[in-house]
Amino acid sequence: MHDQVPGLVWPDAVPDQLAHPLPGRVLVTGAGGSIGGDVVGLLQLYGTHVTALSSTWRRPSPADVVITGDATDPDAVAAALDGVEAVVHMAAIPGEGLAEPYPGYRTNTGATFNVLSRAGELGVHRCVLASSINAFGVPANHHQRLPAYYPIDEEIPRDLDDWYSLSKASDELSAEMAASHWGMTVIALRFPLTSLPSRVRELSRPHRHRQVREGWSYLDRRDAARAVLHALTAPLTGAHVIGLSAVDTFREEDTESLLDAYAPHVPRRRSFLGRAALIDTTRAEVRLGFRPRHTYDEPDPALID
């Protein structure tokens, strides 16, 4: 669940201490969407050249190379990879209600495999791709499921029940294949509800039955883009799945009180002080050196119309 709204204005952003310099040129697929567009702007703030690929554009892209094309098209992706050192793959249908099952699954998994395979064949050694908290299957499951335990981590058992969750789980397997076959470093970021502060609760309301399944988790769009930059520069090899979240939930109640009310029988692997998040972000901190800065009760950042 992501916003489809104008892009963020970055000039006042506080630069991150990244582990290594950013690549000279990065391809961003899905650059016409919210997170993809935000990543383009942040990369440019750091002085990185950007090739932006998208099938549609809600606003003009500030990238220095802009290509209108589909991430499932081998020729379009091959052309977009010209001179590229790393890829940020954000192109996807971002939810199970936005497409019929077969075309939705085919589009998401086909785009990811196409981008990874084309990049691998051309010698591109790093790709950051958008996975989702849905990759473990419970959030959108039509059965009365709850997570196997809290906090939700990257090893939590899967219970796949819908095409979108399956597509994200499949993308994570494609990342493992690409890392093995082409020696790529592929980092799949599991985004939760990702939005502007004022929109977090609004976007979650139609999915009340899912809130407990996702641990009332969310991520500010500014932090989503920052996480991508950390993933582009982290000293890693191979395939990695990384869970992301803000430091808190978007509810006013204490986290332990929420669990007592909505998931009293689900095991808790640790205690949760105050409104502490129910996503385990240890990997993000240790492997990427990433910590979120923003919470949902802050004012919205400035936007580009």
Image (cartoon, rainbow, N blue to C red):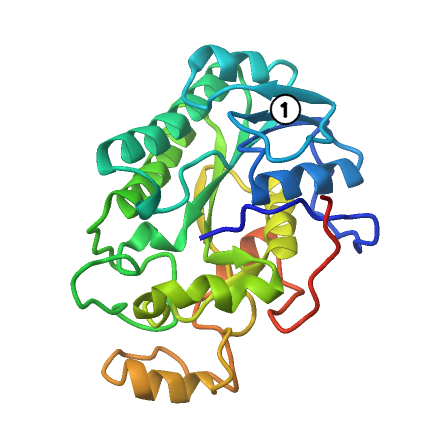
Q: Amino acid type of disc 1?
A: Glu
Q: Residues within 10 Å of mark 1 (few under 14, many from 20)?
A: some
Front position in the image: 241 or 95: 95
Q: Residue at x 27, y 54 (%)?
A: 137
Q: State left or right for residue 201 relative to residue 141.
A: right
Q: Evaluate whether residue 39 shows in this view.
A: yes
Percent of width and height locating residue 233: 64, 41
Picture quarter with the C terminus: top right
Above or below, 175 relative to 83: below
Percent of width and height locating residue 223: 63, 56
Q: Evaluate whether residue 281 shows in this view.
A: no
Would you identify the image quadrant in which residue 43 lies?
top right
Above or below, 86 relative to 173: above
Would you identify the image quadrant in which residue 216 lies?
bottom left
Identify the secondary structure beneath mark 1. loop
Front position in the image: 21 or 133: 133
Percent of width and height locating residue 126: 55, 31
For mark 1, what is the residue? 85
Q: State left or right for residue 149 relative to residue 231.
A: left
User: Count the marks: how many?
Assistant: 1
Q: Residue at x 43, y 14 (%)?
A: 74
Percent of width and height locating residue 270: 40, 80
Q: Residue at x 60, y 66 (%)?
A: 198
Q: Residue at x 27, y 79 (%)?
A: 267
Would you identify the image quadrant in which residue 47 lies?
top right
Q: Residue furthest left?
A: 143
